[in-house]
C-alpha cells in the first residue's frame, strides 16, 4: 500500500476507509456512538448561500451514506434484494456469470470500453478492501462541479460483457453487491478508474456526487469543485507517473494516483475544513488515547440518526474520546504533527492538483503563477471559512495542518478537565493567530516553520494565563520559545489586524499582513495579485485576516517564500511518492534542462568536453603515475621494503558492555521464568535454538552471517558440528523478503516438534517495516510489507510456550506506543558508560554517536564532526528558484555530482575546476584520492555518499564512474553502488588488493559486507530509502548526508541516517588532550577545514580551555584554500595521529592556486620527497597541499616520537622558529604513519548534513535536548495529544520509553494498532523483549553473547554438581586374594556371603575427617591418614563434578514438566491437593512414654493406608507381601528425613521411579511442616513430635525405624486375619538422603576366554530398576541392611571385582525392620549415626550387604541438612564466632551458655578437640581408644576400636591390643566392671565417661569400679556449655594407673 514507508508505491484512497468506518459505526451495537462517525462526519446543515457553508468538514456523499444507513439501522423494514437466479454465482467480487470484477485481479487486463462510457469503481459492503470494476455511461455521472448527472443509470458488466443495464438495482444484483439498503449509484459508485504509466488500471479520483437532484435539500459542500482535479503539468509535487488522461475521461477523474498515498485527505479539499482523516487527530487533543491517559467522557454527541440541529461546534464535539478507530483504515496519517516542514502526511491534502475547496465567492488562481513566482505557494487554512479556489489550481497547495493545530490547542483545557480541574477558557482564536504571527516573525530566512514549535507556544501561552489553576496538576514546562507576555489581556477581533501588523512591522517584510473586511476571498485575490506583480519577493509568509465584530474571524496563512514553500510542499510526499516523483522526472527527461544549465556554467565549455580533452592529453602518462601508489603494495612486498602494518579487520570479541547487556537480557529472561505467571518454564528446556530476522538488505544479511560465523555460537550451542558451512549458517538468519515465509514455517515446525528446546526469535533492526499485515494485502510493485507483522505476530509465535521474541533496534520509539506488545519491564537499554563520573565498564574504545557528534559542534570542543556546506546549499537554493518544477532531491543530487566531478578534476590538475565545487567536496575528494598514496600498502579512506532515492543513486554512480574513468583514476579508488537489494560489486583490481590485505587465498572470494572493504579507498553510494542495519568499516572518513530527504522530519529517520556515522574510537586518545594548550589561540581566519582533517581528532577539549562560540560561515571565494573557517576556531589543537612534516616557508608562500595546480608527478611522489627531506633534517612539505597557517602539530607523535618542541613564547604557534625538525632516526616512523586508514580509524568520521537538518540537530531547547528528539518519533505513529509535556534532556532511556508509551499511539497502518484490550496488562506479550542501543555499538555481539550465556544457563539448569570423591582408606582395607562371588553375579549367595568378613573401616569420603575404626587385622601407619580439613572446608572444598541430569533423576521443586504435574499436585489452575492430618501413636519402652506422630496424607495417597471404618482413624500403612511381584510397583516404602530443604530437597522421584507406583514419605520437623506442605502438596509427610525440633538426623532415623517396626506388627496382625503368615509381610523400608539425585548400575561382560577376564561399563538407571533388582534378591529377608556404593568417576576395576561387600552402608539403604528389631539408631546423634548403627547391626550378628554394582550420586546442596544447625550464644543476639574449644566448660562456671543441643556440642567438641581428653592416642593408630557400645568421631588423628557389651555380640579379638584410652558414653546396664577388665591399657591412658547428669556420673564410676584402675581429679570434670534447662552432658576424665 502506498502509505508504507518501506517503499511500496500503490496508493489507496481515504474514502474507502471512510465508508467502512461509517458502516461499522452504524452497524455497531454500542450505546456510545463510534466517535469516528459522530464527531468527525456529522455537521450542522447550512444553506449553500450562507457564508458559514465553508465550515462543513464532511463530504456530502458520506453524509448521505450516514443518513441512509442510519435510517436503515433504525427502520424495522430493511431492504430485501431480489433472490439471485438459481445456479448463478453469488461470490463477492464476481458477477453472476462468475467473472472476477475486482480491480486487483483485472487491473492489467484489456477492457473494451464503449464510446461515451467510463470505467468506475463500485464498493461492495462485503469487500471493504476491494473495488469492483464497472463500465458506466458518463452522462449518468456528475460533471466536474458535481452536478448535471442524468437521473437513472446505464452500465455494462466488464466481467461477462453483458450490456444494457438500465437500473442500478438490476446492475447491483448482477455484480453481487448484496445490499441491505436501497441501491443507489451515488452511494456505491465511488471512484473513477484510470490507467497509470505502466498501463495498469488504478483507482482515480472520487466521483463527486453532488447537486440538488440528489436530495430534497440544498447541499452545502462539494468534494471537487469544477476545476479542482486536473493533471498537473509538471506533476511537480504529486509524484505523478501517469500519462495524459485517456480520451473521454473527464479531468476530474485523472491523475489521482499521484496523490501521496498517506495524504489521507485524497484530492478532496473538504470545504476548507480539514479532511475527515485529519480530524481524527485534530478533533480531540487525544484522538486514540487510552482511558488511562486522558479518560473518556460521557457521550453528549449525536445519536446514530442525525439530528438536524446537532453541530460539531457544540462542546461535546471536541471532547476527548477513546476512539475505536476502524482497523481497516489503510490510509492513516504517516507523520501527524511532525512539522510544517515535513508536512506530516497526516495533515496534508493531496497533490498540488487538488487544493482544498471552500464556499462563498470563488477565488481565481492566476495563470503562470508558478512561472512568475518560481514556487507553488502553500496555503494553510486557519480559522473560519475558506473560499473556493478555481482557475490554475495546479500552482497552489492547500493544507489543513494549521487548522488542526488550532483545533487541538482549543481543546487544551479538556485535558485538565479529565483530572477534575475547573473549566478553563481555551486560548482564543485571536490569540492563536497573533502568536502564530509572532512565531513567523522570528523565523530566519532559511528556517522552516515546525508545527511542534507552534503547539508548544500555544500551550505555554495558555499555561501562563491560567497558571494558578493548573499549577497543581502539572509541573511548569521550561520556556523554549520566544517570550510571550505572561498575563495577556484578551485580544479582540478588532485589535487583531492592528496587533498582527505591529508585530510584522519589525521583520523587514518577511511576514506580510493582509486585512480584509468581507471574506478571505478578497484577501487571497489581493495576495495573488501582489505575487504576480512581484511585490512579495522578500515576503516568506502572508497572513490574511478577515475580522468583523459580529462573527468569528476567518484566517489563512500563505507560504510564499520559495525555499519554505518548496520544503513544505515536498514534505507532503510519502517516501514512495517521493521516489515516484523523482523517477518520473528522470524518465521524462525533465532533468535535461538542469544538465544543459550546468554546461553553460563552465567557461571552457561542457565538463564532458573538458574531460575528454584531458583524457586525450594525459593518456598513458597520468595513469602510470597515478596508479603507482595503488600498485605499490605488491611491489613493496616483493622488494621487502616498508609495508603498512596497521591493517586488521576486527574479529569477534566480546567487550565488557556487550557482556553486561547479555547478562541484563538473561536476568530479564530469568525474571519472566521466575514470575508466578508460568509464561516461561526454563527448567523444561534442554537446549537453545534461534533465528535472526534481518531486513531484506543483502549486505545486512551477509554481515549477520559473518558475525554469526565468527562468534562460534553455533558450535557452542551444539546446533552444528565442527565443520561449519555457509549453508548451515544461513539456516539461522532469515532475510525478510518474499521467500521468508518458507524459512519461517520451518522454524515454527521445529519449535512445535521440539518442545524441550527454547527458540529465541531475534528481530534485528526491529523498527524496519512495522506495517500491519492487514494493510499490505494489496498488490505491490516493490518488496512485500507487513511481513514482520505476518510472521512475528502470528498466532503460532504468540502462543508457543518455547519461543521468546527479542526485538533489537537502535530506534525503539515505534515499539513504545500505547498499544505496544512489549512490557516496559521487558525493555533492556544499553547502559551508559559513566555514572557520576565513574567509568562503569572499562573499554579501550570510546563510542561516538549522535550526542557526541552534536557535542563536537559546541563551543569549547575541537573540530566539529557535524557540518553543513553553505556554498552547496546556496547553489541548490538558487537552482531551486530557477527550476521550480524539479524536485529538490533531483537538484541537490545533480549539484553534488557536479561538485564531486569538478573536485576530482581539480585534484587531477584541472585547477580551474575548483571554482565549480565547494570547499567541503574538494576536501573530501582530495583526501580520498591522496589517501592511498600515503600508505605503503595503498590503504585509503571510505567516503559514504548517501542518496536515498535509488534512481538518483544510479545516475550518480554512472556519472562519477565516467568522470573517474576519464581522469584515469580507476585504480586509485573504487566507486561502489550500494543497493539494499543486491550485493557488493567491485573491480577485480580492488578485490585482489583486499585479498592481499586480508590474507585471503580463496580464488572466488568477493567482499559481501561493507566491513570487508576496510582500507579500500572508495566512494560508497549508499542508496535505499532507509539504512537497513549495514555497518561501515573503520576506514570510513566522510559521511556525506547532504542528499538525505530533509523535508520528512521524523526522529527515527534523522537518527538512523546519522547512525551511519556512529563509530568506535580508540580511547587512548584522551590521555594527551591538553598538552598543546598554548597553540590554541591561533588566528581563526587562518585555519581551514580543508586538507588537514586527517590529522584532527574530535574529542572533548580539556575543561580548562575557554573558547568562544563562532558563527559558522563560508567565504564566497571559490578558492578552496583561502575559504574562511568552516570549523571551530581551535580545531587543530588536538591530534592523535602523527601529522605530516611541517610546510616549508617556501611552500607557504605559494598561493593556494599554485599549490593546487602543482604537477601530477609532484602530487604522486609524496613519500619519496618526504623521506628525503626528513633525512636531510629540513622542514618538509605536507603531503596534501595546505593553505597558509594550516600546519598541525601532532600531540602524541611529536611529543613522544619525534621530540618536536613547542615554544609557548612564539607569537605564531606554527612559525618556523617554533617547529624544530625531526631527527633523522624518526624518518621511517613519520613515513609509515601516513596511512590514512589508520588515522581515520582513530577518529570519528566527519558528517555533512543539509542545512535544514543541521539546524534541527544542533538546536537544543532550554534543557539541552536536541530539537530532533522532540520530533514525531516515527512515521506510523502519531501523538496522542498536542497537549503533552516536553521531553527533557535528563530523561533516561526508560523515562523516554514511558513518555512515548503515554503520548504516542500507532496509526492503523502500524502492526500494533489492534493490540488493545480493556485490561491494560493483557496487551503485553509475556515472552517478548526489546533491546535498544545506539547504532553500531555492538548489539549483534551482545545478543549472540546472550544466546551463549542463556544456553550455558539452561545446561546449568539441567546439570548438577555431584560429589565425585574416591573412596578413602583403600590401603587399610584387608587385601585378600579370596574371591567370594564372580564379577558377573547378579545377587549374593547367602551362604557365601556369610563367609565374607565385615570390613570395619569407613570408606565413604564424607567421613574423611572421622576417626578410623580399628580391627585386629589392620595395621595403620600414621602417614596413611590424610591431613584433616578445616571445619568450613567440609562442604565448600569437597570435590564435585558437574553432571547432566538424566531422564531418571530426582528433582527439587524447581522442576516442572507435563509428566509430573499430577505427581507434584501443583498446578496453578487448580486448588492445592486436599490433605488430611492423622495422629498415630505407639509406645516405646526405652523412651518411657508414648510417641505421638502425625501423618499428613493427601487424598490421592490415602490408598496406601488403612483407616478404621467408623471413625476414619489411621490404623496402619499397607505393606505388600514378600512374594508379590510387579513390574510397576516398588514394595519398600521410602522415607526421606529432611530439614531446611523444602525447595532444594530432591523429593520428586517420579522420573527416578520411571513412573512406577511407590510410597514415599517425607520426614519433617514440626516447625517446618507448613512450608514443606506448601512446596510438596502431594507428598505424604511424617511430622516428628515437637520435642525433636532441635534434634539431629539420629532422631529421625530412630523414629522411622521404630514406626516401621510398629507398623510391621500392625500389618502382620491385620493380614494374619486374612490368612497370611507374619513372615510373608515385606519387612524392608528404604531410608534415603534428600540429596540423592541419580543412580547408576555397572554392567559386567564376562564373555572373555578366561574366567577372570571381564569388562564393565557404568550407566545411569532408574531407581525403580535398582530397587526391584535388590528386592528380588534370593533370601533377601535374611539381610538386615542393604546399600550401595557412593558414585565416583574414579571407580576402578578392583572396587567392583567383588560385586558384594560386607561393610558400612550410607546415604541410601534398605533396612530390614524385622531383623533389626532390637538394634536402634541413637536418637540423640547429629553426626555419624549411620556408622554407629552399622557397627551395632554387625555386632548383633546381622548381615550388611553392599551391592558394588550399584551406586548413588549425591548432589551438592548448599543449604539445609547439617548446615541448618548454628551454634550461637544464648545471651547475645549479635552473631559471634564461637570456636569448638568453647563448647565445653567446667561445671557451675560463669561461661557463656550456648543455644545448641548438648549432644551437638559434645560431638563437635570431640571431633576437633578430643586430643585434650586422649593425648596418648594422637596419631597412635596401633593403640586406639576403646569405645564401648557407641562410635563417636574423635577426629581423624585418633583411631577407635568399637566393642559391644551385649551378650553374644560379635566383637573383634582384643587379646593382642593395648588401648590408649577408654570412652564410656551413656553406658547402660550391659556395661559391667568385669567386661571392662578384659581390656588392657597403656600406662597413662586416659578415660572419658559421659553421662546425663553429675549424679549418674558418680554412680557410673562406682558401679564400674573405675577408681580401681583410673585416677580422677576434681578439676577433670566438665560439662557441655548449655544452660541447666537445656540438660547439658557431663564428662569425667581420668588417667590409667
Image: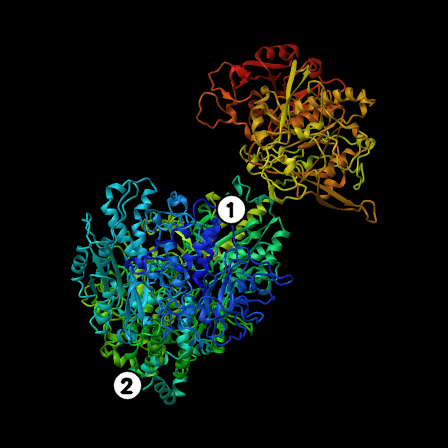
Q: Is residue 835 above or below residue 1820?
A: below
Identify the element where label 1 is drawn. loop
Whole-percent x, y for residue 1749 in the image: 74, 39
Q: Nearer the viewer, residue 462 or 968?
A: 462
Which mark, by number, is residue 116? none
> Is residue 831 in sight in this rendering?
no
> Is residue 435 in sight in this rendering?
yes
Whole-percent x, y for residue 944 in the image: 40, 69
Identify the element where label 2 is drawn. loop
Q: Nearer the viewer, residue 408 or 391?
A: 391
Q: Are marks 2 and 1 in contact (CB under 8 Å)?
A: no
Write down the quadrant of residue 1247 in the picture: bottom left
Q: Is residue 928 above or below residue 1077?
A: below
Q: Is residue 353 above or below residue 1518?
A: below
Q: Is residue 1885 above or below residue 495?
A: above
Write down the quadrant of residue 1060 in the picture: bottom left
Instruction: Name the colour scheme.
Output: rainbow
Q: CA distance from mark 2 to mark 1?
A: 69 Å
Report the residue marked by disc 1: 1326
Write down the quadrant of residue 1862 in the picture: top right
Question: Sequence order check: which comes first, mark 2 or mark 1?
Answer: 2
Report the residue marked by disc 2: 603
Q: Nearer the viewer, residue 1937 or 1556?
A: 1556
**Badge 1 density bin: few <14, some 14–19, many ≥20, Cα 10 Å:** many
Judge from the rendering whether residue 1571 lies leftward or rightward of residue 930; answer left or right.
Answer: right
Amino acid at each position: 500500500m502506498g502509505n508504507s514507508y518501506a517503499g511500496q508505491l500503490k496508493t489507496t484512497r481515504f474514502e474507502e476507509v471512510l465508508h467502512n468506518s461509517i458502516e461499522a459505526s452504524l452497524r455497531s451495537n454500542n450505546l456510545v456512538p463510534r466517535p469516528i462517525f459522530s464527531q468527525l462526519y456529522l455537521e450542522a446543515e447550512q444553506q449553500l448561500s450562507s457564508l458559514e457553508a465553508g465550515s462543513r468538514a464532511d463530504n456530502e456523499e458520506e453524509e448521505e451514506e450516514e443518513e441512509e444507513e442510519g435510517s436503515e439501522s433504525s427502520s424495522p423494514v430493511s431492504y430485501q434484494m431480489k433472490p439471485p437466479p438459481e445456479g448463478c454465482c453469488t461470490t463477492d467480487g464476481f458477477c453472476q456469470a462468475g467473472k472476477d470484477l475486482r480491480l486487483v485481479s483485472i487491473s492489467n487486463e484489456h477492457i473494451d470500453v464503449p464510446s461515451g462510457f467510463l470505467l468506475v469503481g463500485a464498493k461492495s459492503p462485503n469487500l471493504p478492501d476491494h473495488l469492483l470494476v464497472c463500465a458506466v455511461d458518463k452522462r449518468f455521472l456528475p460533471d466536474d462541479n458535481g452536478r448535471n448527472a442524468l437521473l437513472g443509470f446505464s452500465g455494462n458488466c466488464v466481467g461477462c460483457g453483458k450490456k444494457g443495464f438500465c437500473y442500478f438495482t438490476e446492475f447491483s444484483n448482477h455484480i453481487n453487491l448484496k445490499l441491505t439498503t436501497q441501491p443507489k449509484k451515488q452511494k456505491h459508485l465511488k471512484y473513477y478508474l484510470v490507467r497509470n504509466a505502466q498501463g495498469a488500471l488504478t483507482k482515480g479520483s472520487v466521483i463527486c456526487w453532488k447537486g440538488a437532484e440528489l436530495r430534497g435539500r440544498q447541499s452545502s459542500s462539494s468534494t471537487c469543485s469544477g476545476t479542482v482535479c486536473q493533471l498537473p503539468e509538471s506533476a511537480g509535487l504529486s509524484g505523478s507517473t501517469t500519462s495524459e488522461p485517456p480520451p473521454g475521461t473527464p479531468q476530474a477523474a485523472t491523475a489521482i494516483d499521484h496523490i501521496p498515498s498517506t495524504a489521507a485527505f485524497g484530492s478532496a479539499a473538504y470545504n476548507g475544513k480539514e479532511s475527515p482523516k485529519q480530524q481524527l487527530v485534530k478533533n480531540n487533543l487525544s484522538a486514540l488515547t487510552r482511558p488511562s491517559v486522558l479518560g473518556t467522557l460521557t457521550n453528549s454527541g449525536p445519536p446514530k440518526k442525525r439530528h438536524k440541529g446537532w453541530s460539531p461546534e457544540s462542546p461535546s464535539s471536541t471532547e476527548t474520546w477513546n476512539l475505536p478507530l476502524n482497523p481497516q483504515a489503510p490510509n492513516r496519517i504517516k507523520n501527524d504533527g511532525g512539522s510544517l516542514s515535513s508536512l506530516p502526511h497526516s495533515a496534508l491534502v493531496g497533490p498540488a492538483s487538488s487544493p482544498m475547496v471552500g464556499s462563498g465567492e470563488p477565488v481565481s488562481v492566476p495563470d503562470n503563477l508558478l512561472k512568475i513566482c518560481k514556487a507553488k505557494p502553500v496555503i494553510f487554512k486557519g480559522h473560519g471559512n475558506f473560499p473556493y479556489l478555481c482557475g490554475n489550481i495546479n500552482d497552489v497547495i492547500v493544507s489543513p495542518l494549521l487548522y488542526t493545530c488550532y483545533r487541538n490547542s482549543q481543546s487544551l483545557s479538556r485535558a485538565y478537565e479529565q483530572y477534575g480541574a475547573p473549566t478553563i477558557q481555551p486560548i482564543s482564536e485571536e490569540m492563536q493567530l497573533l502568536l502564530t504571527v509572532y512565531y513567523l516573525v522570528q523565523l530566519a530566512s532559511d528556517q522552516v516553520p515546525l508545527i511542534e514549535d507552534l503547539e508548544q507556544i500555544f500551550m505555554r501561552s495558555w499555561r501562563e494565563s491560567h497558571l494558578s489553576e493548573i499549577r497543581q496538576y502539572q509541573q511548569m514546562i521550561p520556556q523554549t520559545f520566544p517570550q510571550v507576555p505572561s498575563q495577556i489581556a484578551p485580544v479582540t477581533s478588532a485589535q487583531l489586524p492592528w496587533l498582527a501588523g505591529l508585530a510584522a512591522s519589525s521583520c523587514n517584510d518577511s511576514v506580510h499582513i493582509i486585512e480584509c473586511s468581507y471574506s478571505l476571498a478578497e484577501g487571497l485575490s489581493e495576495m495573488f495579485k501582489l505575487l504576480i506583480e512581484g511585490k512579495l519577493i522578500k515576503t516568506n509568509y502572508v497572513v490574511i485576516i478577515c475580522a468583523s465584530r459580529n462573527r468569528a474571524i476567518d484566517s489563512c496563512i500563505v507560504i510564499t517564500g520559495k525555499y519554505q514553500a518548496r520544503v513544505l510542499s515536498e514534505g507532503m510526499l510519502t517516501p514512495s511518492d517521493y521516489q515516484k516523483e523523482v523517477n518520473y522526472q528522470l524518465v521524462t527527461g525533465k532533468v535535461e534542462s538542469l544538465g544543459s544549465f550546468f554546461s553553460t556554467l563552465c567557461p571552457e565549455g561542457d565538463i564532458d568536453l573538458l574531460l575528454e580533452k584531458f583524457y586525450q592529453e594525459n593518456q598513458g602518462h597520468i595513469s602510470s603515475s597515478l596508479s603507482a601508489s595503488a600498485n605499490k603494495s605488491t611491489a613493496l612486498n616483493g622488494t621487502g621494503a616498508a609495508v603498512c602494518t596497521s591493517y586488521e579487520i576486527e574479529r569477534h570479541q566480546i567487550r565488557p558492555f556487550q557482556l553486561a547487556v547479555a547478562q541484563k537480557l538473561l536476568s530479564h529472561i530469568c525474571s519472566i521464568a521466575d514470575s508466578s505467571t508460568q509464561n516461561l518454564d526454563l527448567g523444561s528446556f534442554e537446549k537453545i535454538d534461534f533465528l535472526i530476522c534481518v531486513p531484506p538488505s543483502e549486505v545486512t544479511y551477509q554481515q549477520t552471517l559473518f558475525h554469526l560465523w565468527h562468534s562460534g555460537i553455533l558450535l557452542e550451542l551444539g546446533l552444528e558440528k565442527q565443520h561449519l558451512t555457509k549453508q548451515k549458517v544461513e539456516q539461522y538468519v532469515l532475510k525478510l523478503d518474499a521467500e521468508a515465509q518458507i524459512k519461517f514455517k520451518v522454524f515454527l515446525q521445529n519449535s512445535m516438534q521440539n518442545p524441550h528446546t527454547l527458540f529465541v526469535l531475534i528481530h534485528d533492526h526491529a523498527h524496519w517495516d512495522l506495517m500491519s499485515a492487514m494493510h499490505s494485502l494489496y498488490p505491490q510493485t516493490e518488496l512485500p510489507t507487513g511481513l514482520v507483522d505476518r510472521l512475528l505476530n502470528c498466532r503460532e509465535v504468540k502462543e508457543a510456550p518455547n519461543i521468546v521474541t527479542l526485538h533489537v533496534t537502535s530506534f525503539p520509539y515505534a515499539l513504545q506506543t500505547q498499544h505496544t506488545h512489549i512490557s516496559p519491564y521487558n525493555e533492556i537499554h544499553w547502559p551508559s558508560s559513566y555514572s557520576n563520573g565513574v567509568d562503569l565498564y572499562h573499554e579501550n574504545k570510546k563510542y561516538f554517536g549522535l550526542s557526541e557528534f552534536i557535542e563536537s559542534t559546541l563551543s569549547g570542543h575541537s573540530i566539529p564532526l557535524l557540518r553543513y556546506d553553505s556554498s552547496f546549499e546556496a547553489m541548490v537554493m538558487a537552482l531551486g528558484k530557477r527550476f521550480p518544477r524539479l524536485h529538490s532531491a533531483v537538484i541537490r543530487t545533480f549539484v553534488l555530482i557536479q561538485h564531486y566531478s569538478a573536485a576530482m578534476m581539480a585534484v587531477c590538475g584541472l585547477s580551474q575546476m575548483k571554482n565549480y565545487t565547494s570547499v567541503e567536496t574538494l576536501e573530501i575528494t582530495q583526501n580520498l584520492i591522496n589517501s592511498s598514496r600515503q600508505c605503503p600498502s595503498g590503504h585509503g579512506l571510505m567516503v559514504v555518499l548517501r542518496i536515498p532515492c535509488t534512481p538518483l543513486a544510479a545516475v550518480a554512480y554512472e556519472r562519477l564512474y565516467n568522470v573517474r574513468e576519464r581522469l584515469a583514476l580507476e585504480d586509485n579508488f573504487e566507486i561502489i553502488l550500494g543497493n539494499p537489494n543486491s550485493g557488493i560489486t567491485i573491480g577485480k583490481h580492488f578485490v585482489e588488493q583486499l585479498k592481499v590485505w586480508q590474507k585471503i587465498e580463496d580464488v572466488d572470494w568477493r567482499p559481501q559486507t561493507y566491513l570487508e572493504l576496510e582500507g579500500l579507498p572508495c566512494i560508497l553510494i549508499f542508496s535505499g530509502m532507509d539504512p537497513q542495519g549495514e555497518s561501515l568499516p573503520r576506514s570510513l572518513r566522510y559521511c556525506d548526508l547532504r542528499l538525505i530527504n530533509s523535508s520528512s522530519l521524523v526522529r527515527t529517520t534523522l537518527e538512523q541516517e546519522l547512525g551511519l556515522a556512529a563509530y568506535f574510537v580508540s580511547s587512548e586518545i584522551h590521555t594527551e588532550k591538553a598538552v598543546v594548550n598554548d597553540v590554541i589561540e591561533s588566528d581563526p581566519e587562518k585555519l581551514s577545514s580543508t586538507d588537514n582533517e586527517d590529522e584532527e581528532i574530535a574529542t572533548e577539549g580539556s575543561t580548562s580551555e575557554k573558547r568562544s562560540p563562532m558563527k559558522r560561515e563560508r567565504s564566497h571565494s571559490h578558492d578552496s584554500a583561502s575559504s574562511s573557517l568552516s570549523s571551530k576556531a581551535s580545531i587543530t589543537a588536538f591530534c592523535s595521529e602523527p601529522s605530516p612534516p611541517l610546510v616549508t616557508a617556501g611552500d607557504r608562500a605559494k598561493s593556494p592556486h599554485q599549490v593546487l595546480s602543482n604537477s601530477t608527478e609532484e602530487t604522486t611522489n609524496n613519500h619519496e620527497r618526504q623521506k628525503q627531506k626528513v633525512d636531510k633534517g629540513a622542514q618538509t612539505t605536507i603531503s596534501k597541499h595546505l593553505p597558509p597557517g594550516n600546519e598541525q602539530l601532532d600531540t602524541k607523535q611529536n611529543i613522544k616520537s619525534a621530540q618536536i618542541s613547542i615554544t609557548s613564547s612564539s607569537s605564531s604557534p606554527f612559525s618556523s622558529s617554533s617547529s624544530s625538525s625531526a631527527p633523522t632516526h624518526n624518518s621511517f616512523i613519520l613515513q609509515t604513519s601516513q596511512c590514512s586508514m589508520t588515522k581515520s580509524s582513530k577518529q570519528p568520521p566527519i558528517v555533512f548534513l543539509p542545512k535544514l537538518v543541521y539546524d534541527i540537530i544542533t538546536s537544543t531547547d532550554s534543557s539541552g535536548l536536541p530539537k530532533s528528539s522532540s520530533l514525531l518519533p516515527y512515521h506510523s505513529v502519531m501523538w496522542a495529544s498536542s497537549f503533552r509535556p516536553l521531553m527533557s534532556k535528563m530523561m533516561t532511556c526508560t523515562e523516554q520509553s514511558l513518555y512515548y508509551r503515554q503520548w504516542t499511539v500507532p496509526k492503523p497502518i502500524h502492526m500494533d494498532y489492534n493490540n488493545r484490550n480493556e485490561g491494560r496488562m493483557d496487551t503485553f506479550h509475556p515472552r517478548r523483549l526489546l533491546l535498544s542501543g545506539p547504532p553500531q555499538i555492538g548489539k549483534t555481539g551482545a545478543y549472540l553473547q546472550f544466546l551463549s550465556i542463556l544456553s550455558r544457563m539452561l545446561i546449568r539448569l539441567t546439570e548438577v554438581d555431584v560429589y565425585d570423591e574416591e573412596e578413602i582408606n583403600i590401603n587399610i582395607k584387608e587385601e585378600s586374594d579370596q574371591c567370594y562371588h564372580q564379577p558377573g553375579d547378579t545377587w549374593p549367595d547367602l551362604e557365601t556371603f556369610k563367609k565374607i568378613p565385615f570390613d570395619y573401616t569407613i570408606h565413604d569420603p564424607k567421613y574423611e575427617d572421622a576417626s578410623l575404626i580399628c580391627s585386629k587385622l589392620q595395621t595403620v601407619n600414621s602417614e596413611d591418614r590424610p591431613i584433616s580439613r578445616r571445619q568450613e572446608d567440609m562442604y565448600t572444598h569437597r570435590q564435585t563434578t558437574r553432571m547432566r541430569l538424566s531422564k531418571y533423576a530426582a528433582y527439587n521443586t524447581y522442576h516442572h514438566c507435563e509428566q509430573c504435574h499430577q505427581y507434584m499436585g501443583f498446578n496453578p489452575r487448580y486448588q492445592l491437593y486436599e490433605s488430611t492430618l492423622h495422629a498415630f501413636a505407639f509406645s516405646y519402652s526405652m523412651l518411657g512414654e508414648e510417641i505421638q506422630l502425625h501423618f499428613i496424607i493427601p487424598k490421592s495417597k490415602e490408598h496406601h493406608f488403612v483407616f478404621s471404618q467408623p471413625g476414619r482413624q489411621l490404623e496402619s500403612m499397607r505393606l505388600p507381601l514378600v512374594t508379590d511381584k510387579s513390574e510397576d510397583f516398588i514394595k519398600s516404602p521410602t522415607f526421606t528425613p529432611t530439614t531446611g530443604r523444602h525447595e532444594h530437597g530432591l523429593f520428586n522421584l517420579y522420573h527416578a521411579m520411571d513412573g512406577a507406583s511407590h510410597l514415599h514419605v517425607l520426614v519433617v520437623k514440626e516447625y517446618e511442616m507448613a512450608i514443606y506442605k506448601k512446596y510438596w502438596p502431594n507428598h505424604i509427610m511424617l511430622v516428628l513430635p515437637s520435642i525433636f525440633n532441635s534434634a539431629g538426623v539420629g532422631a529421625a532415623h530412630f523414629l522411622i525405624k521404630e514406626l516401621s517396626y510398629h507398623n510391621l506388627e500392625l500389618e502382620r496382625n491385620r493380614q494374619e486375619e486374612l490368612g497370611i503368615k507374619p513372615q510373608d509381610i515385606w519387612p524392608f523400608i528404604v531410608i534415603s538422603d534428600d540429596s540423592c539425585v541419580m543412580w547408576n548400575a555397572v554392567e559386567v561382560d564376562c564373555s572373555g576366554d578366561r574366567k577372570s577376564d571381564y569388562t564393565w561399563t557404568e550407566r545411569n538407571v532408574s531407581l525403580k530398576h535398582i530397587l526391584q533388582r535388590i528386592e528380588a534378591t534370593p533370601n533377601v529377608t535374611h539381610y538386615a541392611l542393604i546399600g550401595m556404593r557412593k558414585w565416583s568417576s574414579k571407580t576402578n576395576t578392583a572396587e567392583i571385582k567383588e560385586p558384594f561387600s560386607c561393610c558400612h552402608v550410607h546415604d541410601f539403604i534398605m533396612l530390614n525392620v524385622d531383623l533389626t528389631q532390637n538394634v536402634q539408631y541413637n536418637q540423640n546423634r547429629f553426626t555419624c549415626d549411620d556408622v554407629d548403627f552399622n557397627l551395632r547391626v554387625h555386632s548383633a550378628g546381622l548381615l550388611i550387604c553392599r551391592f558394588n554394582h550399584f551406586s548413588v550420586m549425591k548432589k551438592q546442596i548448599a543449604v539445609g541438612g547439617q548446615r541448618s544447625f548454628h551454634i550461637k550464644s544464648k545471651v547475645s543476639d549479635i552473631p559471634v564466632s564461637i570456636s569448638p574449644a568453647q563448647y565445653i566448660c567446667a561445671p557451675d562456671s560463669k561461661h557463656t551458655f550456648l543455644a545448641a543441643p548438648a549432644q551437638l556440642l559434645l560431638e563437635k567438641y570431640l571431633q576437633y578437640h578430643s586430643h585434650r581428653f586422649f593425648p596418648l592416642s594422637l596419631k597412635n593408630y596401633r593403640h586406639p581408644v576403646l569405645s564401648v557400645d557407641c562410635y563417636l568421631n574423635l577426629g581423624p588423628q585418633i583411631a577407635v576400636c568399637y566393642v559391644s557389651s551385649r551378650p553374644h555380640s560379635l566383637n573383634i579379638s582384643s587379646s593382642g591390643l593395648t588401648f590408649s584410652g577408654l570412652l564410656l558414653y551413656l553406658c547402660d546396664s550391659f556395661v559391667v566392671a568385669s567386661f571392662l577388665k578384659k581390656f588392657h591399657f597403656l600406662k597413662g591412658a586416659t578415660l572419658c565417661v559421659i553421662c546425663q547428669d553429675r549424679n549418674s556420673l558418680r554412680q557410673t564410676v562406682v558401679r564400674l569400679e573405675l577408681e580401681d584402675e583410673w585416677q580422677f581429679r576434681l578439676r577433670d570434670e566438665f560439662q557441655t556449655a548449655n544452660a541447666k534447662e537445656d540438660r547439658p552432658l557431663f564428662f569425667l576424665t581420668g588417667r590409667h594407673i
